[in-house]
Amino acid sequence: MKNISNTIKDKIKQANLYYQASDFNNACNILQELINAIQATIDHLRKSGESIWGRQTNGELITALEHVLQSLNQNGIYDKEKLKYIFAPTGSLQEIAIDYG
């Protein structure tokens, strides 16, 4: 997985999302872990079959997650509510995980 860009690091600094250097590094690490987790989820979805119980198809979930990744990579911002919906314990992603591990 690629590391977050210097542009995003600059945006974190500008948004004052840290108070000390250690907080800045922590914010960058957390953002990178989120990017890695979303990319891993996309990779798993591409390998999985469709679930008959899910409200969204794999393709729809992949598209939604790719939009989140695009936003993260462009400006370090993401739609928290969209991620909560996608990763909800009763959501389509959970149904696919139950069916395909």
Image (cartoon, rainbow, N blue to C red):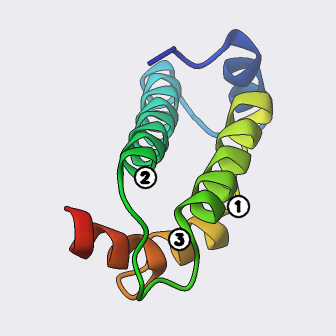
Q: Which mark is residue 45?
A: 2
Secondary structure found at label 1 = loop
Q: What is the secondary structure assignment of the residue under circle 3?
A: helix
- The residue at which mark 3 appears reads as 86
Identify the mark at residue 79; answer none if there is no mark. Answer: 1
**Left or right for 12, reference 98:** right
Is residue 16 in view?
A: no
Q: Which of marks 2 and 1 is nearer the N terminus?
A: 2
What residue do we see at 70% from left, 61% from top? 79
Quadrant where the C terminus sits is bottom left
Of 41 and 52, the residue lying toward us: 52
Q: Quadrant of residue 93?
A: bottom left
Labelled disc at residue 93 = none
Would you place residue 98 above or below residue 8 in this image? below
Given the image, on which type of amino acid does mark 3 rest?
Ile
Q: In this view, does 64 lie to the left or right of 62?
A: right
Q: Which image quarter holds the N terminus?
A: top left
Q: Is residue 58 above or below residue 16?
A: below
